[in-house]
Image: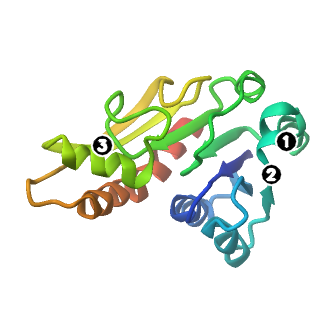
Amino acid sequence: MTRIAIFASGSGSNAERLTTFFAENKSVSIEFFLSNNPTAGVIERGRRLGVPTILFDKKTFTKTDKIVELLQKQQIDLIILAGFLWLIPENLVKAFPNKIINIHPALLPKYGGKGMWGHFVHEAVVAAGEKESGITIHYVNEHYDEGKVIFQAKCDVIPSDSPEDVAFKVQALEHKYFPEVIQKVIQ
């Protein structure tokens, strides 16, 4: 049994997609969602899906071992960041080496780093006149968006695309590939 914890700061669409994808898989369990945002949509998704959600603050996350201890106590095998916006602290990276996976809404190394998330990424892609964008699924290290790449998928960006158009295309890639890539990592 692979026990997964999913961190999310926002709406939680990828957390829901992963949960529904693995719902019938008896060898994978989504144990809980964790969020730093008390108004995040992932909380309601968790309620609807029957997945407990644990809220925490910045001090607990960055200045204590409480989150690491919780994950270890629950025997979590894999941590997935699905729209989680904070840098993962060193104690968590060291406790779960090559066991933390993030999805980023761009083709890293382009458009990564602190502050590059969601609409900020898509606005930058459009402003730069890029011909393509996409997703990067990667292992997490102590730096934003610098861990070893596991998988990338691309979509075309045409001159008439707005940031919202790019976001729509990128999210379609996320929902299609993120669960499949996680399943391959587990196997």
In percent of width and height, residue 57 lies at 79, 49
Q: Nearer the viewer, residue 64 or 171?
A: 64
In this picture, is 2 found above or below 148? below
What's the residue type where badge 3 is placed? Ala
Instruction: Please tell me which residue is depicted at 78% across the width and 25% down the height of the picture.
Output: 91
3 and 2 marks in contact (CB < 8 Å): no
Residue 146, numbered label: none
Instruction: Please tell me which residue is depicted at 9% across the width and 60% down the height of the picture.
Output: 160
What's the residue type where badge 1 is placed? Thr
Q: Nearer the viewer, residue 117 or 45?
A: 117
Residue 60, numbered label: 1
In this picture, is 28 found above or below 47? above
Identify the residue position indicated by label 3 in the image. 153
1 and 3 marks in contact (CB < 8 Å): no
**How far is mark 1 from mark 2, CA to CA?**
6 Å
For mark 1, does the 10 Å Cα neighbourhood hold few (<14), some (14 to 19), or many (20 or more) residues? few
What's the residue type where badge 2 is placed? Phe
**How far is mark 1 from mark 3, CA to CA?**
35 Å
**How far is mark 3 from mark 2, CA to CA?**
32 Å
In percent of width and height, residue 79 lies at 67, 41
Instruction: Please tell me which residue is depicted at 44% across the width and 31% down the height of the picture.
Output: 150
In percent of width and height, residue 186 lies at 59, 39
Nearer the observer, disc 1 or disc 3?
A: 1
Q: Is residue 35 visible?
A: yes
Instruction: Please tell me which residue is depicted at 32% across the width and 59% down the height of the picture.
Output: 167
